[in-house]
Amino acid sequence: MQEDALRILCEKNKNISLEFLKNEINVAQLILSEALKELQKKNLITIQENSISLTEMGQKRAKTILEKHLALENYFEKTESKIEPHTAAHIIEHYVSREVISNIKKLSNLKKGGIPLTQFELDKEGLIAEIVFSDYKLFERAVSMGIFPGEKIIVLSVIPSGIVLKINHKKFALDRSIAKGIKAVEYGKF
């Protein structure tokens, strides 16, 4: 939530009211107040009466967060994903590393989004190029497991109901119908 507050302040590029921020983030007042106190302790924001603004240090941090968000949004605008780009970026932005953002920027230039994991060659290192789900909850679940565009993968085996996938030293068994909605490219060939 702290990152969301910083991103919104950076997007608006001006002082905003506590009420406006509460409506944008859509959380309880108490939770937002705690997050803002932490940001204030870190010298990233100042709060005067009902007005919130970024400090110089906060502006630098917020710019980094906004750049990550915009890179993700740009990527999702170019994919076949049925999820609205701003929403997809919002869901994924808290999980991704700088390396993943770098990979996503490279993936944005691909002419096609890769092949479904069900067709991906076994034991080859790949990069998730696209997730084509129309269900937000399924997309969020995949992201929470570490399955998102720009992440390195290896398809370890095919099982009767799907595939076994390795991401960051973790193994996952994915149902065939889910694996079809995740497309990958061979690592280094993008």
Image (cartoon, rainbow, N blue to C red):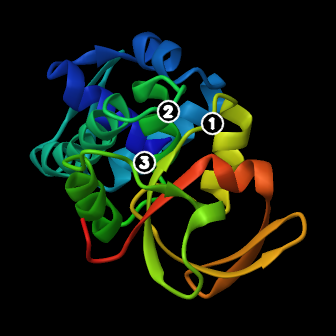
The mark that comes first in sequence, 3 or 2, is 2
C-alpha distance separating marks 2 and 1: 6 Å
Q: Mark 2 points at which residue?
A: 81
Indicate which label's residue lies in the foreground, 3 or 2: 2
Q: Nearer the viewer, residue 115 or 31?
A: 115
Residue 133, labelled with which disc?
Answer: 1
Compared across the picture, whether 139 is left or right of 164 comes to: left
Q: Nearer the viewer, residue 85 or 8?
A: 85
Question: Where in the figure is residue 150, as x and y percent of width and height?
Answer: 39, 61
Cα distance, mark 3 to mark 1?
17 Å
Disc on res. 93: 3
Q: Which residue is drawn at 26% across and 35% down?
A: 74
> Can you say whether 126 is above or below 56 in the image?
below
Residue 26: horizontal and vertical position, in percent?
Answer: 58, 20
Can residue 13 be seen in this snapshot? yes
User: What amino acid is at disc 3?
Assistant: Glu
